[in-house]
Image (cartoon, rainbow, N blue to C red):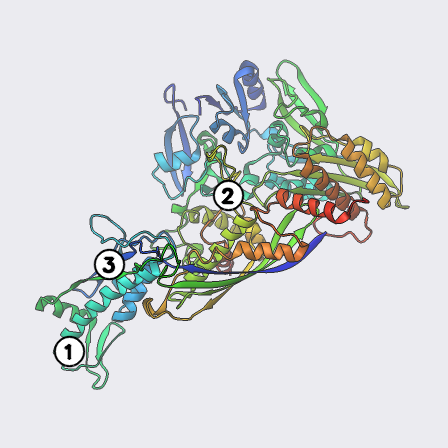
Amino acid sequence: MQNFSFYSPASLEDALIYLSDHAETCKIIAGGTDLIPNLRDEKLHPRHMLNVLELEELGGISEIENTIRIGPTTTFAELIETALINRFLPLLVKSSSQVGGPQIRNRGTIGGNICTGSPAADVLPAVIALDGELELRSKKNGTRRIAASEAVQAPYNPNLGPDELLTGIFIHKLKPGTRCAYEKVATRNAMARAFMNLSIVLQRDEEGVISDVRIVPGAMMAFARRITVAEEVLAGKKPDEFLIAKAAETLLGDLKGVWIPDYKIPVFRNIFKRLLGELLSESCRNKERVYAD
Amino acid sequence: MQIDENKTLLRMCVNGNQVAVAVKPTWTLLRVLREELGLTGTKKGCEQGDCGACTVIMNGKAVNACLVLALQAESKEIETIEGLGTSDKLHPLQESFIKNGAVQCGFCTPGTLMSAAAFLRETPNPKIDEIKRAISGNLCRCTGYVKIIDAIEKASK
Amino acid sequence: MKKRGIGIGSMYYGLGYGYSRPDIASATIELCEDGSLIVRTGAVDFGQGSDTLFCQIVAEELGVAPDDIQIVTPDTATTPDAGPTSASRVAYVGGNAVLNATLALKQTLHGVAESILGEKNLVFINREVRAETSGKWISFTDLARACHLRGAQIVETGWFNNTTDDVDPYTAQGDAYATYCWATQLAEVEVDTETGKVEVLRVVAAHDVGRALNPSMVEAQIEGGVVMGIGYALTEEIKQKKGYTPKISLGEYMIPTSLDVPSIESCIVEIPVSTGPYGAKGVGEPALIPTAPAILNAICDAIGIRITELPANPRNLHRLIQEKGKKTMGPEN
């Protein structure tokens, strides 16, 4: 690794000042599970390393009425273990459970998963499906918020200014009765990069009509986004297998630049139908699927 | 504390002992443990976080020492395999591994033991599936994991 | 759709190097004055347990405890050559060498004990040498001391030659290997036809090892080999580029994790071979060999597809499933 100077700020303010002073040559480290292999592979050559992992302001999970605030340095393990997340945002528990292995989950952070901008990220698609909002701060420009879906629109290129720090992730609690599901397809059952992942959030009214649905494929394209055209096929309708099939085709039609398409496209169609079908089934109490009921 | 233009003083607690060692910012905790502190029980497998041979317990959590920058370990409590048990007084997990044939070449063993130790502290009465998951970040080529899982289960009783 | 299948793989494996290639092992054993023993051999224990095995052999023959025996690890300065640890040969060839050294020492010890006790029929047991009929006995330690005081031969060498004749290159008749290991494994799999992912649910492995000198270690070899076989069949892949193997990490070269292993049942079959130490053969490589065939046969049983190229990872298997689907759908589709 090329040499860099390492700074552990005492406060968020200090961090922002440092970042502002060294914007072009600085990398931010939290859990380091993506960063350190990249440093070792000589893919990155920062001259300054800003260690944000210890900053209290960037940690913690709290409830502000109907919103949950998640500190970006919250680890995947912490998300899995926190009652608030299990109760109101179970999609984050399921997606975090699929990351790497126990050691990685003890260090890797939700903020890192967002800011690394990997097309194969396991948790960012779930945050997008939950309509998460990201709070960004810089010394020069203060605080702003963007939708999680705007965070990454090119691989490994998050939409953060060089002097900006992710300081909070805000997600509305899922309404009671909302169902969500997450599936990851990979070569083996742990420690594997996803071929694809899929997050679905679904709400139906008393008559079984779909009132809200969010569909976010991950590791399928350069970056993850909601496939609104497929969501529109389903919204406001009572679903049957023809509707699901139509939604699947609409979804696939909207995917751009899929890598290894002859594998990923047909498999993704199957995964989508399977996952949605399970979510819609009345008897769906499969413990593999998570609920906000 | 900056020592010179290249090195900073790192202070941490390793196996119950306060240590202070001069480190370069690019060094990982793994390198410091092995090369500076002579604690070579923690193994260097892939240095990418893919194999778990370098697993240590940091502030109670099993982590890959190769993915912790040394200076990130400032003021932390680190437990390595050397601290788990001694040849005079083995940890129950170590005894169980030996008794149940869970050690072959031994390269994955320190890391696997540390993952298991951290896990059993949180989950003292685990189910088999939980044990499998707890060591899913530790690759082993010799044993096929069968006797390792068995040894962890027996140690938990 | 998830489909299950069961498959069988069988194998036989020639132990050692065969085909007249040199295949020997040497070992020395030394009796110390306090009754402890030192075995020196170049055989490498890299975790499979040969050191333990040698200890067992000496303890068995001389009636001493494993703690009384020191196995000196391979050192070109001090240990005689025993050949490499490969070809599943160490228990058989190395074990025989250690056994032969031990038997030579035992003969010396027997002679000295005979002259002390005045009895011929002696058993070596529980750190004693005991006359069967009269019950007269001498402790092993005292016997060792006596041997030293009398200048008896207290260091012996044992040697075993597993080199075979050769096979006629034209008729293919002859003696390829001295002995063979036999095994059959059964695998039960579940194929997800929609993703191409295969879960191995269960493997039952029956291995003829001649004699299981240490059953736990034999099981451990079988379990390790089976999981290696699962990786070989389903996930491990290296693509050479223009004859070169590219740099590949453990993140890209996928070996099974603990969450990828099925239940594995070992059935140890013992058909002793007269040339092996106590009838033992080997199991290191045999453990790996039938697994992939069993898994591929199970996949065929599940979905009717014959796989001829490995790995049958999700991408490759899914492609075969798609191709089969197109063929069976017929021209009107």
Dot 3: within a 10 Å radius of its alpha carbon, few (fewer than 14), some, or many (20 or more) residues?
Answer: many
Using the image, determine if residue C58 lies above or below residue B88. below
Q: Are marks 1 and 2 on the same chain?
A: no
Hey, which residue is sitting farthest bottom in the picture? C133
Between marks 3 and 1 in the image, the one whose residue lies nearer the viewer: 3
Residue C92: x, y in percent? 34, 62
**In this rendering, would B11 be left or right of C254?**
left
**In this rendering, would B134 be left or right of A178?**
left
For disc 3, the marked residue is C27
Kind of residue at badge 2: Ala
The foreground one among C38 and A290 is: C38
Residue A228 figure quarter: top right
Dot 2: within a 10 Å radius of its alpha carbon, few (fewer than 14), some, or many (20 or more) residues?
Answer: many
Between marks 2 and 3 in the image, the one whose residue lies nearer the viewer: 3
Q: Are marks 3 and 1 on the same chain?
A: yes
For disc 2, the marked residue is B62
Residue C284: x, y in percent? 42, 57
Kind of residue at badge 3: Ala
Dot 1: within a 10 Å radius of its alpha carbon, few (fewer than 14), some, or many (20 or more) residues?
Answer: some
* Residue B8 visible in the current orientation: yes
Q: Secondary structure at mark 3?
A: strand
Q: CA distance from mark 3 to mark 1?
A: 26 Å
Q: Secondary structure at mark 2?
A: strand
The foreground one among A95 and C324 is: C324
Between marks 1 and 2 in the image, the one whose residue lies nearer the viewer: 1
**In this rendering, would A216 be left or right of A23?**
right
Residue C218: x, y in percent? 43, 62
| Chain that bears disc 3 | C
Residue C36: x, y in percent? 21, 63
